[in-house]
Image (cartoon, rainbow, N blue to C red):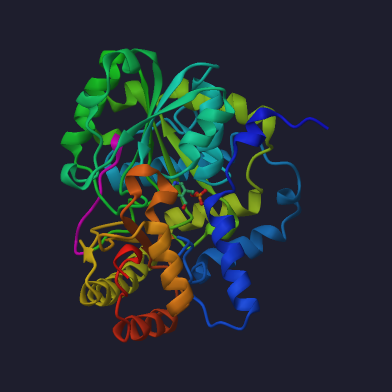
Amino acid sequence: MKLAQRIHRLQPYLFMEISRKINERRAAGADVVTFAIGDPDLPTPSHILRRLLEAAQDPVNHRYPESDGLPEFRSAIARWYHQRFGIALDPDKEVLPLIGAKEGIGHMALCLIDPGDVGLVPDPGYPVYAIGTMFAGGESYFMPLQEENGWLPDLEAIPPEVARRAKVLWLNYPNNPTGAVASLDFFREVVKFAKRYNIAVCHDGPYTEVAFDGYRPVSFLQAEGAMDVGIEFHSLSKTYNMTGWRVGMAVGNRELVNALMRVKSNLDSGIPQAIQVAGIEALTASQACVQEHNAIYVRRRDNLVQALTRLGLRVIPPKASLYVWARIPEGYTSATFATMLLEEQDIVVTPGAGYGAYGEGYIRLSLTLSDADLERAVARLANWHIPPPPRQR
Ligand SMILES: Cc1ncc(COP(=O)(O)O)c(C=O)c1O
């Protein structure tokens, strides 16, 4: 058997590797606390589950869904975008339900990238932007995200010859893994850059609703001209604790939405309809649950930031996203530091280098673990002294 080159080029998916390590430690009897994956620990709110259960019992929802989703779901998405961001979307042409944002992101590369084309991809970043580009036969040009630039890419630093070859620019704010946020002014610059080089912008925004201290993240599509160049990926996963149901959406430029719909209609058969009905409920019912979840995350954020700061790590409390991004002491790599935390404290964090070379020197901690787990981890950290780095021992 001869597998395709793209399979040989794949590294193990970051979180599969982490899960393997956690299972290994647990099998050895360890009480492992994990901050690794951004997967909300709290259940899907009960009003959403009730609609899902009802819809699951209706035989009309037992058959193949349409690839472009239920018209009622597309309308609910358009209405939600209008209420939340003031953006008017045509539900039939500018909205596409997805089997989670990850699915749409992976497939989007097939709409934009031909072999040899360039995708502009943030580093550190969610791994799927670069992997989708590679699957489509393209090359990623990694745009460094650095602390001194507020974890925003410096678009002017992209060499013009690279920008001219680029077909797509990937962005993600509020950001995974850094927790950084972007302003509308930054997005306006992005639109100008995209128009100058005729590049499509794919903005991935699944964390716009996970925000703290009164901060309200913006949508890329709020920038003037964004609908001419861009598409935004969104998800019900993080906002409504629905990661397990696999439901998200892409909205924006109709040519991009239509291209994605055409790719998807040839590869998948849409989201199970009962889940779309649950999605309608999530987007149209009271949004009080979102505020309740955020109140829990902010408490966890403050508790964790305090524990990490006491330990001597440099942390800026995030205004949004599910992640605390902490600078580790000099002398460690993010992998050696994460391994030491696991081996000495049975605490799992994600090494920043797993998100790209510019993530080196940082670790990411997700706020999606139970309060009890968080308390156990905080107590362990309070009694831990970071050993001197290997080369100083
Ligand atoms: C930046 C980013 N985009 C997309 C996703 C995937 O979201 P979904 O569950 O909708 O596939 C994640 C999940 O962690 C993410 O962090």
Residue 137 shown left or right of residue 382 in the figure: right
Whether residue 198 is visible, yes or no, is no
Image quadrant assignment for residue 337: bottom left
**Which quarter of the image is occupied by the C terminus?**
bottom left
Q: Which of 113 and 389 lies nearest the eye of the viewer? A: 389
Which percent across, then down, holds residue 320?
28, 57
Residue at the image point whose x is 64% and y is 54% from the top: 274
Residue at the image point whose x is 25% and y is 35% from the top: 153
Q: Which residues are magenta?
A: 213-220
Of all residues shown, which one is farthest toward the right?
1
Which percent across, then down, holds residue 265?
65, 29
Q: Which of 153 and 271 lies nearest the eye of the viewer? A: 153
User: How would you classify the magenta stretch by its main secondary structure?
Assistant: loop
Residue at the image point whose x is 58% and y is 75% from the top: 25
Residue 243 shown left or right of residue 338 in the figure: right
Whether residue 20 is visible, yes or no, is yes
Is 215 inside the magenta-drawn segment? yes
Above/below status of 104 relative to 192: below
